[in-house]
Amino acid sequence: MPQIPLSTVLERSRLVSLLTDLSASKLSSAEYNLAERLGHLVGLSGSITLANGLRKLPYEAGRSLLDDAAVLHGEVLDSRERMINVIASSFNAEADIHIKVPSATGGLRPEALQTYEPYQRFYTAHQVEMAVGVSNLRARVRAVMSGFCVELHQLAELDKTLDESLAVHTRKLFNVIPKLLEQRFKSLLQAHRQDMNGNVDNDLENWLDSGGWLDLFYRDMRELLLAEFDVRLQPVLGLLEALNEQTDTSE
């Protein structure tokens, strides 16, 4: 079975690198230190839930056709491509898409485009869509794995337990990103105003020229969204890789 081209997927460390670049001293140390927060994802209650889940892992399962795994592989690739295209298209003000980057075309005045709230709503809308899409895809992969063999059924149940145990902590972790992004927005806007020597500048075309402050901010948002999507998708790709290994040995 053809494998997912993992080399084309952004490395997980890229998200941490981007967030580090965007970090500002105004953030608390707990928000800044992502490694520390990741280390605290599983607290005492989460550990107890995980332990109980491990004791209840099933030892019997049905068997799916190998064709199911091949179909699933295509579904994951298609879903990944679709979600990436949604992110990319959302930065085109003329695109027919329900999530669009804040712009004058969308009816916002220059004054509104110099406040962070519209961009926060835009980024958060993408986060919600990514969370739902990846969650559905992850459940779909688990369902196919559960019917394939006992070992994969156990892995699917373990992944479900981990997913449920870490859900709240993961959501809090991703909520840090818009805070970091706000600091980047303020920094770019401040630098632009300093360049204007206090003069009022409502030239939107100038803002969006290559290297303009808003153009740079759009680039940062787009890169962060793609990196965050990659991190959210990693568990799905890990499950699919395990399924691929099993189907390769079964053929």
Image (tube, rainbow, N blue to C red):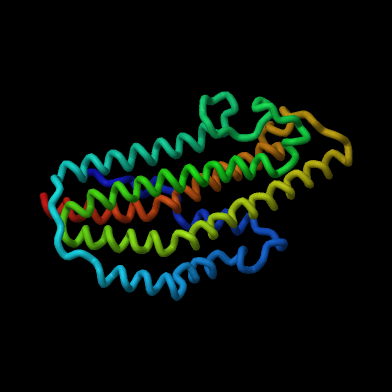
Q: Name which residue lies at 25% across and 68% down.
A: 56
Name which quarter of the figure residue 18 lies in. Answer: bottom right
Q: Pinpoint residue 167: horizontal percent, then vertical percent.
A: 45, 59
Q: Name which residue lies at 59% across and 53% down.
A: 177
Drawn side of residue 26 relative to residue 201, left or right:
left
Residue 45 vs 215, above or below: the answer is below
Name which quarter of the figure residue 154 lies in. Answer: bottom left
Drawn side of residue 241 relative to residue 12, left or right:
left
Residue 230 vs 102, above or below: the answer is below
Drawn side of residue 96 relative to residue 64, left or right:
right
Q: Name which residue lies at 15% across and 57% down.
A: 61
Of residues 147 and 72, the one drawn nearer to the viewer in this rendering:
147
Residue 185 vs 249, above or below: the answer is above
Q: How many marks?
A: 0
Extreme left residue here? 251
Of residues 47 and 67, the one drawn nearer to the viewer in this rendering:
47
Of residues 232 and 195, the one drawn nearer to the viewer in this rendering:
232
Drawn side of residue 159 relative to residue 88, left or right:
left
Quarter of the picture containing the N terminus is top left
Q: Name which residue lies at 33% across and 73% down.
A: 51
Q: Pinpoint residue 234: horizontal percent, then vertical percent.
A: 39, 54
Of residues 118 and 187, the one drawn nearer to the viewer in this rendering:
118
Extreme right residue here? 198
Q: Pinpoint residue 184: horizontal percent, then vertical percent.
A: 68, 50
Q: Pinpoint residue 141: horizontal percent, then vertical percent.
A: 29, 49
